[in-house]
Image (cartoon, helix red, strand yellow):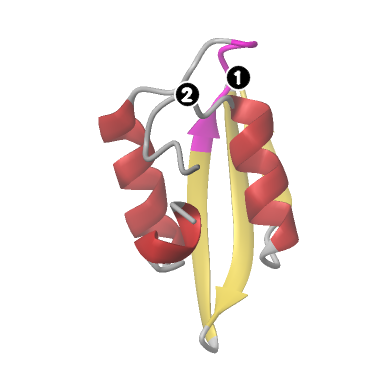
Amino acid sequence: MTRGKSNWTFKDVEKFLRANGFAIHHVRGSHHYFRGFILGQLRMTHVQYHGADSIHPKTLGSIIKQSGIPEEKWLQ
């Protein structure tokens, strides 16, 4: 069963990004910046760390757009 854009934590997003070719680039405060190549293009996204709290669905939508990974792949 898919969870849509709800109930994603920082660890879930980090694990997904790493599995799709992203690596941590740098950390500035609570913002973790990930960089990776998607479809031959260098992409960078940042994810704010809030411990075990869920990431707001609109924030996750922004992360999805920045990453360049198709939304369908995120929501499988």
Q: Which residues are magenta?
A: 47-52
The secondary structure that dominates the magenta segment is loop
Q: What element does badge 2 sit on?
A: loop
The residue lying at 49 percent from left, 56 percent from top is: 76
Task: Please identify the quarter of the rendering in which residue 56 is found.
Answer: top left
Nearer to us: label 1 or label 2? 2
Classify 10 Å Cα crowding around label 2: few (below 14), some (14-19), many (20 and above). few
The residue lying at 68 percent from left, 30 percent from top is: 11
Q: Is residue 49 magenta?
A: yes
Q: Is residue 54 magenta?
A: no
Task: Please identify the quarter of the rendering in which residue 18 is found.
Answer: bottom right
As shown in the figure, which amino acid type bears the numbered disc 2? Asn
Spatial CA distance of label 1 from label 2 is 23 Å
- What's the mark number on residue 7? 2
Q: What element does badge 1 sit on?
A: loop
Which mark is first along the chain, 2 or 1? 2
Horizontal arrangement in the rendering, residue 23 relative to residue 37 (left or right): right
Residue 9 x, y percent position in the rendering: 57, 25
User: Can you identify the residue that label 1 sits on?
Assistant: 29
